Image: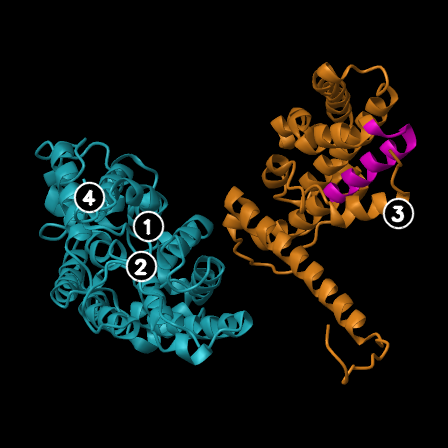
Chain colours: A cyan, B orange
Amino acid sequence: MAFLRVTSPHAHTVQDTASVMRLVLYATIPGIIALTWFFGFGTLVNIVWAGFIALVCEAAILKLRGLPVGFYLKDYSALVTATLLAIALPPYAPWWVVLVGVAFAIIIVKHLYGGMGHNPFNPAMAAYVVLLISFPVQMTSWAAPLHTLVEHPLPPGPLEAISINFGLLRDGVDAITMATPLDILKQNKSLMMEDLWLANPQFGLVGGRGWEWANLAFLAGGVFLLARRVFTWHAPVAFLLTLALMAGFGYDSGSSQSGGSPLFHLFTGATMFGAFFIVTDPVTSAVSNRGRLVYGAMIGLLVYIIRAWGNYPDAVAFAVLLGNFAAPFIDYYTQPRTYGHG
Amino acid sequence: MASASYSELSANGLWKNNPALVQLLGLCPLLAVTGSVVNALGLGLATTMVLTCSNTAVSMIRNITPDAIRLPVFVMIIASLVTCIELLMRAFAYELYQILGIFIPLIITNCAILGRADAFACKNRILPSLYDGFIMGLGFTLVLLVLGAIREMIGSGTLFDNMDLLMGPAAANWGFKPFDNYPGFLVAVLPPGAFIFAGLLIALKNKIDKTLQQRQLAQQAQAPVASKRVRVTGNIS
C-alpha cells in the first residue's frame, strides 16, 4: 500500500495530487490554444506524443521499481511533466527530440532521484536544458507566427504538423521558422530600439507577435490556478517583479545598448509560462512563503542576467535549475519560527 | 604482513575494489577524458604505466623511507614518472598529447596512484606491488574504455574514431559509424554526461554484485540441513 506523502504547508483543502495536477493541465489550455493559433498545430502534436511517451516510461519504471503502477499513473504527474516540456519545446521539434527529452525527464530526473515528490530538479526544465545543450539546431528553430506577418495562408494544420515532426517533411521546417524577438534583441548591436521594432515584424505591441498573446494566455491560466489556491502568489509575483525591475534598470528608453523594456521582458519568451507553471512547482521550489519570495526573486534576477549577458536568448530553464539548486539553502535560512518561540 | 595472493589481487583491481567504480578515485580524468575511446585508452595506458612503475619504485625503497615524509617522497616519484610519460607521449603520440592536454600532467594528482602507493606498495614486496599497480591500472583503464565507448557511441555516434592517434596509421579506418545521419547527443560528450554515465555504470556494478550475492545465498539456503529432532517432552530450558 502506498501513501501520499504530505509535507508542509499543510493546506486544509481536499485537494489530492491528482486533482491538483488536473487543474494544472486545465490551466495550460488557454496557452496551448494561443500557441496553436499563432504557431500552428506543432505544439499539440508534441503534447500528445510527449504524453504517450511519458505514460509508457512512467509505467515501465514504476514496474521496475516494484511500485503500484495504476496508483501512480492516475496522479497525472507524468502527463503534467510531458505537457510542460512539450509546451516549452519548439512547436516543430522532431519526434526524437521529444522522445529523448521526455524519457530523460521521467526516467533520470524524476525516478532515479526517488520519483514523485523527491526530485530536486524540475523534470521538464532539466530535460529542456539537456535538449538545448545537445541539439542546439533543432531546439533554436522556433516557428514564426507566419499568417500574421506576411501573405501566408495559415500555419501548419494537424496533418502537416504531424508530417513535419515525424520526419517526412523535415525540409519544410526552415520555411516556417524565424528568429524570435529575444534572438533579434540579442543579436542587435547598432539599431535603436524603435528602429529595431520597425525593422523586424516579429515584434508585436509590447512583446513578440504571438508571444505576447501566448504569455497573456498563460497569465490567465496562472491566475485561475492562483484563484483555486493551487499555489501561493509569492514565487510568481517575486519572479515577475524582479524581472520587471531588472529590465527597468537595463532599459535606457531605447538606445541600441539597452535590453528591452520591462513590458517586453514580461510578455515575451517563456516568462509567464515559467512564472506560473514552472517556478510554482511545489516539489523543487522553496517551502515557506518567505523562502518562495527569495526563490522567485532569485530566478527573476537570473533570467534577466542570462537574457541580457548570457549566451542563450531565453533563460527560464537555466534560471529555474539554478533556483532548484538553491532551494534547500533558501529553506534553511527562511525557516518559519515556531509559534511561541523567540 | 602476509601478501595477498595474485588471484586475489586481480579480483580486487578488476572488480571488487576497482579504483574507478568502487574507490571512486581518479574521478577527474575519468570524467574529463572519456569523451571518446581513443582519449580514454590513451589516458588509461599512461595511468597504468605510471601506477605500475610507481608501485614498484615505492616498494623498492619502502624500508628506507621514513614514515613522516613518505607522502612527499611518493609524490616526487610519481611526478618524475609522469614527466617521463609526458615526454614519451609528446614523442610518439603528439596529437593525442595535445588533445589530452593538461590531463597528462594531472595524472600526478590521480588519487588512485598515491592511494595504491600508500595502501599497498609501501607495505609489500616488489613483485606483488608491481602486479597490484598493473592490475589496478588495468581495472581503471577498462572502466575508462567502457565509459569512453558508451559516451562516444551515444554522444557522437561513432566508435573507435581517430584511433590512429594512438595506434599509428594502420588504425586510421578502425572508426566505425553505424548511422549515417546521427544528430549527436552532445550532452553525453560534455561533463554532465560523464557524471550520468559513470553513475549508471556504478549502479550496474552494484546491481550485478547484489544479484550474485542473492544467488549465492539462495544456493546456500538450498543446501540440505541436517534434520533435528524437536524435543516434545520434559522441561524446556
Mark 1 against mark 2, which lies toward the viewer?
1
Q: Which residues are magenta?
A: B123-141
Mark 3 against mark 2, which lies toward the viewer?
3
* Mark 3 neighbour class, 10 Å CA radius: few under 14, some 14 to 19, many 20 or more: few
A204 and B143: which is toward the camera: B143
Q: Mark 1 or mark 2: which comes first in sequence?
A: 2
| Protein chain holding label 4 | A
Asked which secondary structure carries label 4, the reply is: loop
Provide the residue designation for mark 1: A317
| Protein chain holding label 3 | B
| Protein chain holding label 2 | A
Q: What's the CA distance linking mark 3 and mark 2?
A: 55 Å
Q: Amino acid at mark 1?
A: Ala
The image quarter containing residue A187 is top left
* Mark 2 neighbour class, 10 Å CA radius: few under 14, some 14 to 19, many 20 or more: some
Marks 1/2 same chain: yes
Residue A62 x %, y %: 49, 72
Asked if residue A25 is among those painted magenta in the image, a careful observer would answer no
Residue B47: numbered disc: none
**Vertical placement of B218 versus A262: above or below?**
below
Main SS of the magenta part reads helix
Q: Amino acid at mark 4?
A: His
Mark 4 against mark 1, which lies toward the viewer?
4
Provide the residue designation for mark 4: A341
Q: What's the CA distance linking mark 1 and mark 2?
A: 9 Å
Residue B172: tell me if it is visible.
no
| Protein chain holding label 1 | A
Determine whether label 1 and label 2 are within 8 Å by CB.
yes
Asked which secondary structure carries label 1, the reply is: helix
The image quarter containing residue B228 is bottom right
Provide the residue designation for mark 2: A88
Provide the residue designation for mark 3: B7
